[in-house]
Structures are given as structure tokens and as C-alpha cells.
Amino acid sequence: MERARRLRAIGFRRGRYQSKFVARLAPKTRHVRSIQPGMVWESLFMRKSRVEKRAIVQKPWEFPMAAQHLAAILIQKRVRGMLYRLHIHQDNQWRPPQLCRATSSRRHFASPMQRFIHSTNGTFDDDQGFRHYAATLIQAWYRKEQLRWRYTRQRFALYHIAALQIQYTWKTHYQRRLYRKHHPSRLGGASLSPRARAALTIQAAWKAYTNRRIYRYYRDLITFRNTGDPAMMLRAINPSEAGLLDAAMGAHVRFRLGGMSFPPTIYYKIFTRKAVCDLNAFSPKDYTLTRRTVPPTSHSKPSQPHQRLYIRVGQSYYRARQTAEEQDRQHWYKRIENNGWRPVTAKVLSEANHDPIAQATGQKAMDRFHYSRLVRKQDIETQRRLRKRQWMHKLYTHGLLTDISPEATSLLHRAHSQEVFDVDFENEQWEAEAEEMFQWVSALDYDAYLDDWHELGKTASTDDDTRLIQPLH
């Protein structure tokens, strides 16, 4: 026993259980060879004995790929045998009786009634007893199969993994076959006739034309700027909220195109230019939590003067103690406006509120909503400058405004310059094209673009009487 264990350990260490596939009758080489589809290949593990194969499968952690390959090969072997036997059985059903008698099994088994009479000393007339006997046999067989399945599943779990991989590969192959069968036009133009290719080209051009017409129709609906009565527009969209718009609140409605699919959907959102008072923003802390002060430690350094907190009362300053609750803003007040982009739809409002974009924008929380309007304006201006820097950085990165020094331009090749500036220097009009491109780049203004974007699709304010009477263009 000890000698067999040593031989097995030496076989594992010396490469007896190799984990690569080779083609049959292929010369030995140290280079890795790729398996080509359609070629007959075999695993070196299939040359091992049945005991060695079982040892590899029972311990997949030693050679996982080898165990997986052996399990998959064994499952395929069993399935092929089953399919072959079913094929022979179907062929035998159409054979004459004298030919089929030689291949059929000559073993005879006792019927359930004979076994019932022999084991329980019953009679042929005892129908109730035979039914109980048959039910007992079925229950015993089912319990036996359950235990056997559970034992096999727990002992050889790798077979299930291999079966899943085979099923996944077969499903992928079958789906590819179905796709090729039902979508032959998408496999390439080589297998299509010139008439079919021309029809596909016409269909694609017509679809592109209709899609552009649809987009232009929706786009032209929201090209107005700071005109129109928001209350009257909202009365046609959402009558329940139209009465909430008061002239003193300075509200206006913006319209945008969006959606998860084509054609786009028109979304609207209500904004206000007047002051918004949020009482919870004055004190966003959660006072229900236990106030815990930070315990001083012997090795902690004294706080710096600029890190201390003071409260001014008149002409006096009082030092404040910062607690752990104030440092952690996880439980602080978060403002949820419930005023997202909602779709302009002819359906009922309950279905419009279930729109994914309306839910995502309506439930957006604002962690740092300051109570002061001046501070909020400063935060908005800071975010605007940050977006402008990002926009300019992207513009320079993509090469639209690339600055090239005179020393670098002398080293650049002519073809490379043409690729950078996208100007055909062989053309006589290249100077006019370069000047036109320079004028276009110089006219790029992020602030003007942002102002134009904010005014697009925007109604007049409720407190602006001069613009409410202007018609929409």
C-alpha cells in the first residue's frame, strides 16, 4: 500500500498527469499548439487507467482542468452510448419479428403480480393488497433513487460543473444556428443576391430618412425660448399641478428630449427663480443620536489653531467642541425634491410616474443643500467653472485647439500636419479652409453655449408679463 502511494505521488510530481491536449499522431514538440476546430483530438488523460481517472475526478483541487476535461469526456461518452442504443432500438421496431428475435434479450423477469403472490402469499383477487404492494415498491424505488442521486451529487460534484459547461456550449451553438436560419441577411453580403443587397440598402436609407423626420418633428416642438405661459402649458399636461403655479413664485417649465429608446419622449420639469426656504436645511444634523465626544488620548497631538472651531456672539468668540456625530454626515438631512424630469404622455399620470427616467431624477438626493441662497449660487457657479474646465480640457485633448511651438512645427512631417489639422495642403484653397477652421474654433464659447442650452425649450416665467403673451414659434 505504501509503495502504491509513493508511485502515485511520483507520478503526480514527474508529470504523469499532463494537462494539455494533443492531436493524434502528432510529433512531440515543446511549443504550444492551438486546437483547430474539426480536427480529431484526444486528451492524454484518456490513456490512463480507470483507477487513475477516478482519482483525478475525485480530487479536482489537485488538477482542476484535468478533472474537468475527464468529467466532460465521460459525460459525452455516456450520452453518445445512450443515443446509439436509442437509435438501434428505433431501427429494431421496424424490423421483421424473425430478425428482431435474435437481438432481443432472452431473460425473463417475474411480473409484479407474481412477485406479490410469491412474497406476501396473496391471491389474484386481492386488488387492494396488490395496490398497496405496488405503491410500496414505487415509494421504495423513489427513496432509493433520491439517496443515490444525493450521494452521487455530493461525491462527484465536478460532473455537474462539466455538464453545465456542455449545456452552455450546446445552447450557444444552437442559438447561433437559429440566428443564421432566421437572419440570413445579417451574415454578410457574400451570400445574398444583388437584388437582395439593393433592397436592404433601400430599406436602410428609408429607415434613416424616417428616423430623421421623426427626430426633427420632436425637435421643432421645443425650439421656443422664454415664451409661452407655463400654467397653460402645464394645464394640458398635468392639470392637477397647473393650479399650483402662482405669479409670485417665478416658476417656469423646461422641455427636453430623452428616453430609453427611439423615438424620443418629451420630458418636462418645473423650475423656480424665487427663493426656496427649507427649514430642515438650517439644522441638518440628527439630534436623536447620542452625542459622543471624541475621547482625548495620551499620544494625540494638540490641534492646530486653524483646526479649532469658534462661535462668534457679538464681539466675543467662544470655542466649540466638535463631536464624532458632527464629523460623520451619514445621518444628516438629505433633500429630495421629488421634482424630476417627467414625460409628456397621453397616458394616465400614474403610468407616467413609473417612467425610469422620472423615477431616477425624482428620487435624486441633495446631500449639501445650504439654507442660504447666496451660498447655493456660489456652489452652482463653482460647479459651472469646473464643467467648463473639463470641457476645455476635452477640447484640447482631442486636438481641436492643440498648441504647437515653432520648434515642433519645423520637425513635423507634412503628412502628419495634414492629419492633425485635417486640412488638405495640396489644395489651392487650403489657406481659406485653415482660416475658416480657425474662425470656427475661436467662436467656441462655453458660456454662450450653456446659456443657449438653458434658454432652449424654456417657457416664460410666471412673473414676466411681457413674455407670457408672446406666441410660440
Image (spheres, rainbow, N blue to C red):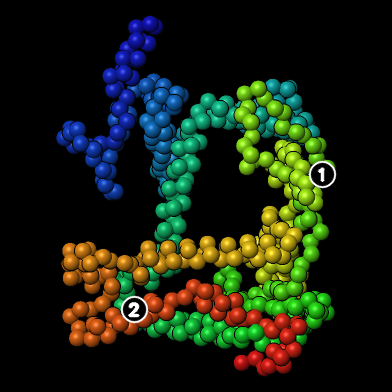
Q: Quadrant of residue 417?
A: bottom left
Along the viewing direction, whichever of 416 and 463 lies nearer the viewer = 463
Residue 237 visible in the snapshot: no
- Give the left or right position of residue 277, taking residue 427 as reference: right
Q: Name above or below for residue 188 compared with residue 66.
A: below
- Counting every numbered tag in the picture gives 2
Q: Sequence-wise, which precedes: disc 2 or disc 1?
A: 1
Residue picked out by circle 2: 438
Identify the amino acid type marked 2. Answer: Phe
Q: Name above or below for residue 76 compared with residue 150.
A: below
Residue at 67% x, 75% y: name it: 268
Residue at 31% x, 67% y: name it: 403
Mark 2 near mark 1, Cβ–Cβ under 8 Å?
no
- Give the left or right position of residue 359, taking residue 383 as reference: right
Residue 2 percent coordinates (x, y): 38, 6
User: What's the distance in space between the residues labelled 2 and 1, CA to CA?
Assistant: 60 Å
Residue 327 percent coordinates (x, y): 69, 41
Task: Spot the residue most to the front.
Answer: 315
Residue 171 percent coordinates (x, y): 46, 51
For label 1, the SS is: loop
Identify the amino acid type marked 1. Answer: Tyr
Residue 61 visible in the snapshot: yes
Q: Name above or below for residue 455 compared with residue 21.
A: below
Q: Quadrant of residue 35?
A: top left
Residue picked out by circle 1: 287
